[in-house]
Amino acid sequence: MPRAVLGFAGSVEAVAQFAIAFRWLSIAIVAHQFINTLFFRRLFADSTPGSRDGPLATTVLLVAFAALAVIGLLASGLPSRFGVAIPRPGTLVWLLAAAIVLWSATACMEGALFRVGAIGDQSRAVCAGLLAQIAANLALMKVIDDRILLVTVAWLIGLATMIAGQHRKLRQAGTPLPMVVGVALGGAVVAVSIACLASSGTNP
């Protein structure tokens, strides 16, 4: 969705800048995919609802640490020595790190919703997130001049809205994941705070 909005309202350079930063941060998603593939049965099929929260929260935490490791690698400048294009670890990179952490939480909660047969509620949560993202893009258009930062912030708002919808249904089903939500929001708040500090001192 962010790339689609940039492609429509931004420039080719903006799309490329976002794509490079996102591809680097998406390396952290590998940690999520690895854990969920390796321990899928233990996390969802064989586990009781109350026992999923801790392992899934650990998954989100590992994704956060993986994103932090990627940012550390970018800050070192090591990949550029091999001719690899890298983004500067500024505002955009930290905002994308927050988005990756929230995405991991939504994926964990999606699996939990499927486990309780709430597929329709998952679809409604996704729709709510998309609508929130579109609304945020329109509402913040005159507040945030940088189109790349605008679509990234809107994406964060959409992901947070999606998590709220997912958590509400899981709580109603008696299978809440408070640790997952806490780790995801905590990690995102830290990353966004650092992004704000970076934006006040340097360019994105």
Image (cartoon, rainbow, N blue to C red):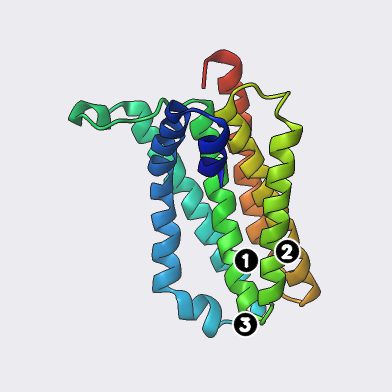
Splitting the image into 4 quarters, where does residue 38 fall? bottom left
Precedes in sequence: disc 2 or disc 1: 1
Query: What is the CA distance from the residue labelled 3 to the residue labelled 1?
Result: 15 Å
Precedes in sequence: disc 2 or disc 3: 3
Circle 3: is it few (<14), some (14-19), or many (20+) Cα within 10 Å? few
Mark toward the viewer: 3 or 1: 1
Badges 2 and 1: C-beta atoms under 8 Å apart? yes
Please report the residue visible at 53 percent of the width from the left and 53 percent of the height from the top: 61
Q: Which mark is residue 167?
A: 2
Query: What is the CA distance from the residue labelled 2 to the residue labelled 3?
Result: 17 Å
Pick out the residue farthest to the right.
172
Find disc 1 in the rendering and name its residue: 109
In the rendered image, residue 193, in percent from the top left (x then y), is placed at: 63, 31
Q: Amino acid at mark 3?
A: Thr
Q: Is 20 situated above or below 112? A: above
Mark toward the viewer: 2 or 3: 2
Q: Secondary structure at mark 3?
A: loop
In the rendered image, residue 146, in percent from the top left (x then y), is placed at: 59, 23
Please report the residue visible at 56 percent of the width from the left and 65 percent of the height from the top: 56
Residue 158 vs residue 70, the one in the foreground: 158
Q: Is 171 situated above or below 32? A: below
Residue 181 shown left or right of residue 152 in the figure: right
Q: Which mark is residue 202?
A: none
Pick out the residue farthest to the left.
82
Please report the residue visible at 47 percent of the width from the left and 54 percent of the height from the top: 62
Q: Is 160 situated above or below 204? A: below
In the rendered image, residue 166, in percent from the top left (x then y), is placed at: 71, 64
Find disc 3 in the rendering and name its residue: 48
Q: Secondary structure at mark 2?
A: helix
